[in-house]
Image (cartoon, rainbow, N blue to C red):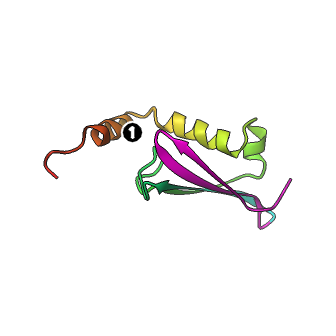
Amino acid sequence: MSEANQIYRFRWRGIEIEARYIPVQYNAIAHLELESVDPVHEPLPMTETGYRSHYHPIGTIEASGYDVIGFVRAWLDDAAESPKWKQAELARRQGDFFV
């Protein structure tokens, strides 16, 4: 298993996301950071700030059968099913006339 930092960029629903992944950190844990970079700080289903730091057991992503981007996309798609996200996404698409 590689311990090198891995950086990925991809688009999800029109948002460019950077995923930074460290498969083994401190010989004890794996670390995944997500950040919306275009638009900057655009909310994501699992974070209103556009940034999320997630520590998990080593090998979690690899055992899922996904690569890092596939894992993050699956996480985003699953989280985007929440009523709160659907409502916020609809509001962003419609805009606000009173801003």
Residue 13: x and y, percent? 47, 38
Q: Quadrant of residue 67?
A: top right
* Residue 8 belongs to magenta span: yes
Q: Is residue 17 above or below residue 94?
A: below
Q: Which residues are magenta?
A: 1-26
Measured from the top left, where is residue 71 in percent x and y? 66, 41
Give x and y (percent) for residue 75: 57, 40
Q: Magenta region, mostly helix, strand or loop? A: strand
- Foreground residue, 40 or 28? 40
In this picture, residue 86 sits left or right of residue 10: left
**Horizontal side, residue 9 vs residue 97: left or right:** right
Give the residue furthest to the bottom: 26
Residue visible at 46% across and 42% down? 14
The residue at the far right in this view is: 1
Furthest residue to the left?
98
Q: The residue under label 1 is which amino acid type?
A: Trp
Q: How many marks?
A: 1
Reading the image, the residue beneath label 1 is: 85
For disc 1, the neighbor class at 10 Å (few under 14, some 14 to 19, many from 20) is some
Specify whether residue 79 is painted magenta. Answer: no
Which residue shows up at 66% across the image and 39% down it?
A: 70
Indicate whether 71 appears above or below 36: above
Instruction: Decide if residue 46 is on the left or right side of residue 97.
Output: right
Position in image of residue 55 (x %, y %): 65, 56
Q: Residue at x 79, y 62 (%)?
A: 4
**Secondary element at image label 1:** helix
